[in-house]
Image (cartoon, rainbow, N blue to C red):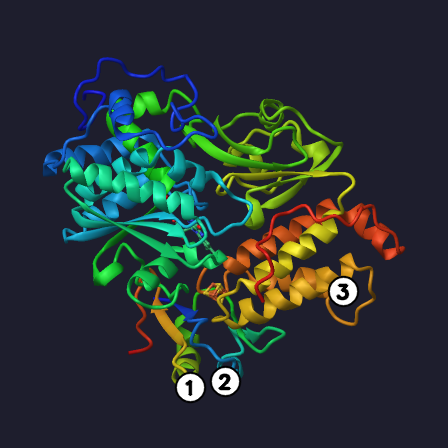
Amino acid sequence: MSATAVAPRRRSVPDPHELPRLLAGAGVGQGPVPLEEHVERHGVLPKEISRREAARLIDLVEASGLRGRGGAGFPTGRKLRAVAERGHRAVVVANGSEGEPASAKDKVLLRRVPHLVLDGAALASATVGAAEAFIVVGEGAERERLAIEDAVAERERRRLDGVAFRVVTVPDRFVAGEETALVNFLNGGPAKPTFTPPRPFERGVGGLPTLVQNVETLAHLALVARYGPAWFRGLGTEDQPGTALVTLDGAVGRPGVYEIPVGLPLRDLVERAGGVSAPISAFLVGGYFGAWIGVQNAVDLTLSNTGLAAAGASLGAGTIIALPTGTCGVVETARVARYLAGESARQCGPCLHGLDAIATAVEHLAARKKQRRGGSEDLPRWTAQVKGRGACRHPDGAARLVESALTVFADELARHARGTCTGDGRPLLRLPEARR
Amino acid sequence: MSSLLRVNPITCEAHGLCAELFPERISLDDWGYPIVDPEPVTPELEEHARRAVEACPTLALALLRAGDRSPSGKT
Ligand SMILES: Cc1cc2nc3c(=O)[nH]c(=O)nc-3n(C[C@H](O)[C@H](O)[C@H](O)COP(=O)(O)O)c2cc1C
Ligand code: SF4
């Protein structure tokens, strides 16, 4: 079996051990990589692919071990196969909504290498038999939308693709990027999740089998198709091959989006970002659906799901935040818990009532208030109870974050119980401006 | 052959009848919403399960045959 699937033979295949891959040629502060430059670097993709080529591409993606980068880490090859096997005209949705306020990696990708994302969406469309591909960005992501629209226009002028791209903006809400919420929205409904089954791959946009894939996943797909699974596995771990975009924020020298090989030690990432800018007490790994890890356990961790499992975390969509000792982890958790409660789609009782109760309890702990309910017995019971009881995983993520805080910030909680707090009161974790 | 109970949390309005009719597998959380025991519903319990499914005013409860992904308890 030859290394590549569908791309023309290239003069040079990039070094499989070299970084960056996705962000090659994309300088910080520069505009999007133009089409000519993109084609120069990666070659043109065929406009149509045969059934045999489509089947081969699925095999290659499966062999590459590529997993979804929207948070859940589902094997991409398996999802492509599930949609292709419906044997029906399908729809592709490129999920660039990035509803999490702390995450910036999808925006960076959309704004710097829009053609790589579109390549991936075009290939995925050809593979599953879609005539239409929706490229979804958040309402506030003006620059990203323009970059993608310009890129689509460039390709249309050159009649590069066999699929029609539709650029769509979704409301900037946390749950809007959940896949059934996107499908619901694209079908003219509110951007709120729906009960499954049917899952999008069974019945999605316009009732057609729908492939929802994070934009970073599609960008990797575009490289796997050209350079093959062995190349893709040249970086990353056995279980999670390839590189990943991570958003690093908090008390580091140069916060920002970094492309790392999956499995990179956390300390190496921090070093690349210019080291810490203050003493650190904990890291939040996996964003607002992620988990806090105390600094003593964090420094030796490697950034892969296997590496993070021991600390009860996973990479999620790749957001990592360094919490300085001068910022109170309990107060920060309370802020995010309240934000996540407010972002509930308010459809499911356990999410609507549970996340609100959890947020209130954490707020009381943060404010060093005595409380009748939500004390030491109620809170762990509530976080356990809400998991798995929404139509989507929103409550699960919020509960996980709070649970990790109760463990990692045990000392700080004890201080709060005595009426003191180590925080300086300045907020750290990014939240959208109050809109309620 | 055993079955599985599944709640549609979007349509559920915490009427709580299911927990009354099928306490063997359904309890209520602090806000009155059903918590379903993940244990499969054994054939002896199926009658109770079916009654709970039928009693739900919002048709939020379904009895799925184990290994089957589509709801069978509601139409
Ligand atoms: C509450 C919630 C919010 C989500 N938001 C996003 C998002 O903003 N972007 C994204 O790509 N996936 C998001 N997801 C995950 C999607 O449902 C879906 O799994 C993903 O887009 C699939 O693409 P992937 O397999 O390439 O990761 C969210 C999931 C949940 C439960
Ligand atoms: S679990 Fe929460 S966010 Fe998800 S659908 Fe239900 S109410 Fe909406």
Q: Which residue is mark 2?
A: B17
- The three-letter code of the residue at mark 2 reads Leu
Give the side of residue A220 with respect to residue A7, left or right. right
Relative to A3, does residue A337 appear above or below in the rendering?
A: below
**Structural crowding at the residue carrying mark 2, measured as other residues with C-alpha within 10 Å and reported as few (<14), some (14–19) or many (≥20):** some
Give the side of residue A122 with respect to residue B32, left or right. left
Location of the N terminus of chain A by quadrant is top left
Q: Are marks 1 and 2 in contact (CB under 8 Å)?
A: yes
SS class, disc 1: loop
Q: Which residue is mark 3?
A: A375
Please report, as a chain letter, where disc 1 is located. Answer: B
Q: Residue at x 19, y 52 (%)?
A: A90
Percent of width and height locating residue A180: 36, 59
Percent of width and height locating residue A341: 58, 63
For the residue with label 3, is its CB less than 8 Å from the closest atom of ligand 2? no
- In the foreground, A86 or A318: A318
Foreground mark, 2 or 3, reads 3
Give the side of residue A324 with respect to residue A130, left or right. right
SS class, disc 2: helix
Q: Which residue is mark 1?
A: B57
Location of the C terminus of chain A by quadrant is bottom right
CA gap, disc 1 and disc 3: 34 Å
**Structural crowding at the residue carrying mark 3, measured as other residues with C-alpha within 10 Å and reported as few (<14), some (14–19) or many (≥20):** some
- The three-letter code of the residue at mark 1 reads Pro
- The three-letter code of the residue at mark 3 reads Gly
Relative to A276, does residue A344 appear above or below in the rendering?
A: below
Percent of width and height locating residue A38: 29, 26
Q: Residue at x 38, y 67 (%)?
A: A190
